[in-house]
Image: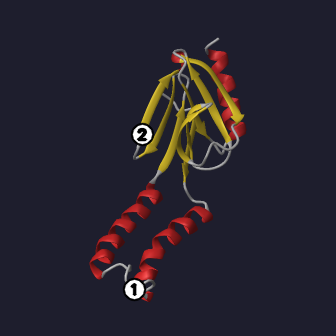
Amino acid sequence: MKTEFKEEQQFRQWWVWLLLLSIGSLPITAYYFKFESNKTMTKDDVIVFVPLYILFLLFFFFLKLKTNINKDTVSLIFFPLYKKSVKWTDIKSAEVLNYGFVGGYGIRLWTKYGTVYNTSGKIGLAITLNNGDKFLIGTHKEEELKAIIQNIKSLHE
């Protein structure tokens, strides 16, 4: 099937990386400067912590939200965590909207939009399935997505 809409998003906000790097640097800083000497990390703790922390950073670096929409399906991949594909015949409604703040980025459960998949921003494609389930996919291509959704809706009417 020819893809009508394709978007890839990653966590590349400077403040996210500042936060991730700051959190990881605290235990290492405590070890090297011997803060609270009776509670500092040992050399063995650092040997275990540093590789795990590097894996954690790599996980965030490679975390990617991919959206593909064509005349038959809407699919999303939140690599490496989740994959979903829905046929347009199973979709009751699809609307590009401003969903505001839903408690953060990533995969947000139990929102009024169902499960929200996003990496930043507040614009997304809200989908309600025929069975009542809902989910929302964040986007940075609002106008392009609106045009594609309108075109695909007209095909299925």
* Quarter holding residue 130: top right
Q: In the image, what residue type sits under mark 1? A: Ser
24 sits to left or right of 104: left
Q: Earlier in the sequence, mark 2 or mark 1?
A: 1
The location of residue 36, given as percent across then percent down, is: 44, 83
Question: Which residue lies most toward the front here?
Answer: 38
User: Label 2 to label 1, Cα distance in Å?
Assistant: 43 Å
Residue sitting at x 41%, y 57%:
59
The location of residue 51, given as percent across then percent down, is: 33, 70
Q: Residues within 10 Å of mark 1 (few under 14, many from 20)?
A: few
Q: In the image, what residue type sits under mark 2? A: Tyr
Label 2 belongs to which residue?
Answer: 82
Residue sitting at x 48%, y 24%:
86
Query: Nearer the observer, disc 2 or disc 1?
Result: 1
Quadrant containing the C terminus in the rendered view: top right
Q: On residue 117, which mark appears?
A: none
Label 1 belongs to which residue?
Answer: 37
Q: Nearer the viewer, residue 134 or 58?
A: 134
Q: Residues within 10 Å of mark 2 (few under 14, many from 20)?
A: few
Question: Which residue lies most toward the bottom here?
Answer: 33
The location of residue 68, given as percent across then percent down, is: 52, 35
Above or below: residue 3 compared with residue 23: above
